[in-house]
């Protein structure tokens, strides 16, 4: 069996992955808060953990992997959006949830086995909070319930911080209902304008962190294999998840392996609306950038390194994918994925290395091997291929071939140069050899720019 190695944020080193139960490999990934379109930074962990999901299924089999990714559909940002727009919260969350699924599907992400919504698990959250109070790890005051951070001796182990250092180095809200500045909210009161549920502590709603602990416990148990998300979630979200989950269910170990992807930049700068470089996935798709191209760019950088989205990378990715789709057209994928591709992905999701191996297969003309390996990464699938279909350049090949034949006689190549320049401006790669003329759509191909050339 393939040996998988993953960089465990918990131990800060690369480890051999050994599932708790090879017949039931379990992974939980923090999903979106659904109040708006997902920006391209939100999409990076989706693609990263989609590849891990595909790898686990390749190694252990589809029937033996359970992948959970949640939706946070109760949150102050959602409340604010409802207040601004005058629309019902349920309408906003339903719409943005579908936007998210559509946009991530356009990037070739498989839907997880379970996609729980926080609002469907309120009773489980209340039950977990009650147990934490009963065991002395939480307390209720003024309609709030707080987790006692200092009651959990290992708090800070995941992020590598001490409680005292956290207090000294940050401005922490000292609310009147807190025993300690670092204590975090498990439950808070709701007024008439906010969503709320009845509880032993009054009408209210859950804090953010308790959601994932309750949902992961219900769907995966007190111990499961992998917990993932962006590295911006390591503290406080994941740190708080560990604390409350391990205290509520001390018989388990919560997540055994933790994976965190690095953040995304745009053209070398942090993405922000003030810089004008803030893009949603929907924005890029609307600009005509295929989802498969976006996915390829993401996979070209290791998940543990900052990723820089650039127009140049998108153009290069499009050109490569067009070549690969031309090479594999009408070909059935090999029954086995090349060992070199599997080895790269199994080595801490080295997708950049896997793409390098795919280039080797393409260079060797192994179309079936290229297709099998690419599809393991979620590339060159039928579902993502519509953008590359329907390009017939045979008439232009004939035009250029005729012009070249005439030029060989007259020694006047001005017409050949004119046609080549027009093709290049339209994003067509021109290949000329003794065997003939070959034209391939390349980066930024625009058929409209060919009008009038024939």
Image (cartoon, rainbow, N blue to C red):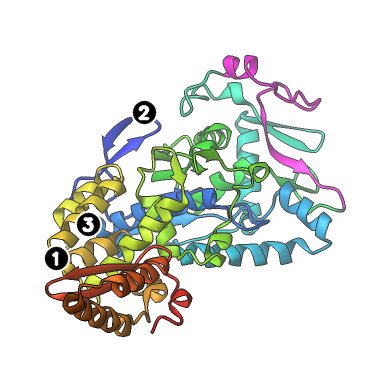
Whether 393 is drawn above or below 34: the answer is below
> Where residue 366 sits: x, y (%)?
14, 65
The residue located at (49%, 55%) in the rendering is: 69
Q: Which residues are magenta?
A: 163-192
Q: Is residue 380 magenta?
A: no
Q: Which mark is residue 358?
A: 3
Q: Which residue is mark 1?
A: 366
Number of on-image labels: 3
User: Disc 2 on helix, strand or loop?
Assistant: loop
User: What residue sits right under mark 2 in the picture?
Assistant: 12
Q: Is residue 158 above or below residue 351?
A: above
Report the mark closest to the observer, 1 or 2. 1
Q: Is residue 179 magenta?
A: yes
Q: CA distance from mark 1 to mark 3?
A: 9 Å
Magenta segment's dominant SS is loop
Within 10 Å of disc 1 (Cα), the crowding (few <14, some 14-19, many 20+) is: some
Q: Is residue 109 above or below residue 32?
A: below
């Amino acid at each position: 069996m393939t040996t998988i190695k993953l960089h465990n944020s918990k131990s800060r080193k690369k480890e051999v992955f050994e599932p708790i139960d090879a017949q039931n490999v379990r992974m939980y990934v923090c999903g979106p808060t659904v109040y708006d379109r997902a920006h391209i930074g939100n999409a990076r962990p989706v693609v990263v953990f989609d590849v891990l999901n595909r790898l686990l299924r390749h190694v252990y089999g589809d029937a033996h992997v359970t992948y959970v990714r949640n939706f946070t559909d109760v949150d102050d940002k959602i409340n604010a959006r409802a207040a601004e727009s005058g629309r019902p919260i349920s309408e906003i969350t339903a719409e943005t949830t579908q936007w998210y699924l559509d946009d991530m599907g356009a990037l070739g992400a498989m839907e997880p086995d379970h996609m729980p919504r926080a609002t469907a698990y309120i009773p489980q959250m209340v039950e977990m909070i009650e147990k934490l109070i009963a065991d002395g790890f939480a307390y209720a005051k003024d309609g709030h319930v707080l987790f006692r951070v200092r009651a959990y001796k290992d708090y800070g182990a995941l992020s590598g911080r001490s409680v005292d250092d956290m207090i000294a180095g940050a401005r922490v809200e000292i609310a009147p209902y807190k025993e300690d500045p670092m204590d975090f909210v498990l439950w808070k009161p709701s007024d008439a304008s906010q969503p709320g549920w009845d509880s032993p502590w009054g009408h209210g709603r859950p804090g953010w962190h308790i959601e994932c602990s309750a949902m992961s416990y219900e769907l995966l148990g007190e111990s499961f294999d992998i917990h993932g998300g962006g590295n911006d979630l390591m503290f406080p979200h994941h740190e708080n998840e560990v604390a409350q989950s391990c205290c509520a269910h001390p018989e388990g170990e919560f997540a055994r392996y933790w994976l965190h992807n690095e953040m995304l930049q745009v053209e070398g700068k942090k993405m922000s609306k003030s810089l004008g470089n803030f893009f949603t996935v929907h924005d890029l798709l609307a600009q005509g950038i295929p989802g498969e191209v976006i996915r390829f760019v993401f996979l070209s950088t290791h998940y543990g390194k900052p990723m820089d989205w650039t127009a140049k990378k998108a153009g290069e990715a499009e050109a490569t994918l067009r070549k690969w789709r031309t090479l594999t057209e009408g070909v059935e994928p090999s029954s086995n994925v090349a060992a070199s591709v599997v080895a790269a992905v199994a080595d801490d999701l080295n997708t950049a290395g896997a793409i390098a191996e795919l280039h080797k297969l393409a260079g060797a003309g192994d179309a079936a091997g290229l297709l099998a390996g690419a599809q393991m990464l979620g590339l060159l699938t039928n579902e993502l291929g519509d953008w590359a279909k329907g390009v017939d350049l045979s008439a232009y090949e004939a035009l250029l071939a005729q012009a070249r034949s005439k030029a060989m006689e007259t020694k006047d190549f001005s017409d050949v140069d004119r046609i080549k320049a027009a093709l290049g401006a339209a994003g067509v790669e021109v290949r000329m050899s003794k065997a003939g003329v070959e034209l391939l759509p390349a980066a930024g191909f625009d058929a409209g720019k060919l009008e009038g050339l024939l």
